Image (cartoon, grey):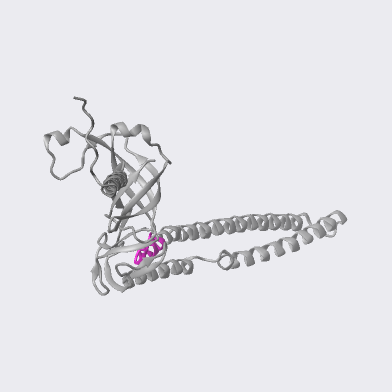
Amino acid sequence: ANSYPAPNTTPPSSRKSSINYRKMKKIALITTLIALIACNNKNKFDASGNFEADEVIVSAQQTGQLIDYDVEEGKTLTEGQKVGQINVALLKIQKEQVEATIASLKEKTQNPADQVALIRSQLEVQRAQLAQQERELTRTQNLVRGGAATQKQLDDLTALVDQLRKQIAVTENQLKVSLTNINTQNRNVLSQEAPLQKNAEAVQEQINQGDIINPIAGTVLTNYALKGEMQTFGKPLYKIANTDVLTLKAYITGDQLSQIKLGQQVTVRTDAGKGAYRTYQGEIIWISQESEFTPKTIQTKSERANLVYAIKIKVKNDGFLKIGMYGEVLFK
């Protein structure tokens, strides 16, 4: 007997429904695969780490009571802004004493013109006498030639002129010695002024250190002091950091070193909640030259065998980034 295929007894409408079901099932499977691939790609990243900033602890540079202080946590300060004052009243009094001592030195100096006025007057009188006697000597010499005066008169006038000249020489020498002595004395007195002036400058520097000047522009992270408290040299007052630009410190494995270089632009992302991310443009500014163990509080023997390299990425902060926040890095 001949065998024939059994006739298809399924109604046409049922066959059409079965085909549509298989198509829908295939589309759903493809959609699920695409979603899984997208999810996996979204969860993939090349490195991760935490954001940090260069924190500066501002300390007191002088000992005394904090009589003025305008620092609050979260407050933004500018570079060079005066934010406080430590009492330096005693130092100001000390500087005034030094300045008074400097002023008194000038009173101890002598005016050379006043001190040698008498000697100058005596010298002028002697020179006038010498001029008069020299004229008299010339007249007598003429009289001796004419026989109207004796040789003794001429000799007496000659001796008198010589004596006046010697007296003038002595007086001129006395004048020079007096001027030298006065100038030497003045120099000895004024030589004390330079060390005292340096002392005054040192005290002024201590006074300036009573001013609390903010060193960098940034946001106050922690405040340690209150107005009215006693401060000592080196005691921390507040901690500040520039949060406009943060640094993401992440870790990569050795086989990733060939993928990065200094100055390279990378993508940084942070969690924005509900599975969303915020993305930022970052720049690699530092790559460690030495490997280290994976930074974990507790490490197993196998984990300690995994060496990583630290990198730092500079990221401009839009206000959402915070110090200590987790971030992920994508090199491509």
Residue 315: image x %, image y %? 38, 51
Residue at (34% x, 70% y) in the render: 84
Residue 331: image x %, image y %? 37, 41
Question: Magenta span covers which residues?
Answer: 199-215
Residue 8: image x %, image y %? 24, 40
Q: Nearer the viewer, residue 14 or 51?
A: 14
User: Where, by quadrant of the figure, is residue 55 drawn?
Assistant: bottom left
Residue at (67% x, 55% y) in the render: 165
Q: Nearer the viewer, residue 103 or 70?
A: 70
| Residue farthest toward the top in the current orientation of the protein | 1
Residue 323: image x %, image y %? 29, 56
Left/right placement of residue 113 relative to residue 138 reads: left
Left/right placement of residue 200 relative to residue 153 reads: left
In the image, residue 100 sits, relative to residue 142, either above or below, namely below
Residue at (41% x, 70% y) in the render: 100
Q: Quadrant of the C terminus?
A: top left
Magenta region includes residue 213? yes
User: Where, by quadrant of the figure, is residue 155 drawn?
Assistant: bottom right
| Residue farthest toward the right in the current orientation of the protein | 146
Magenta region includes residue 76? no
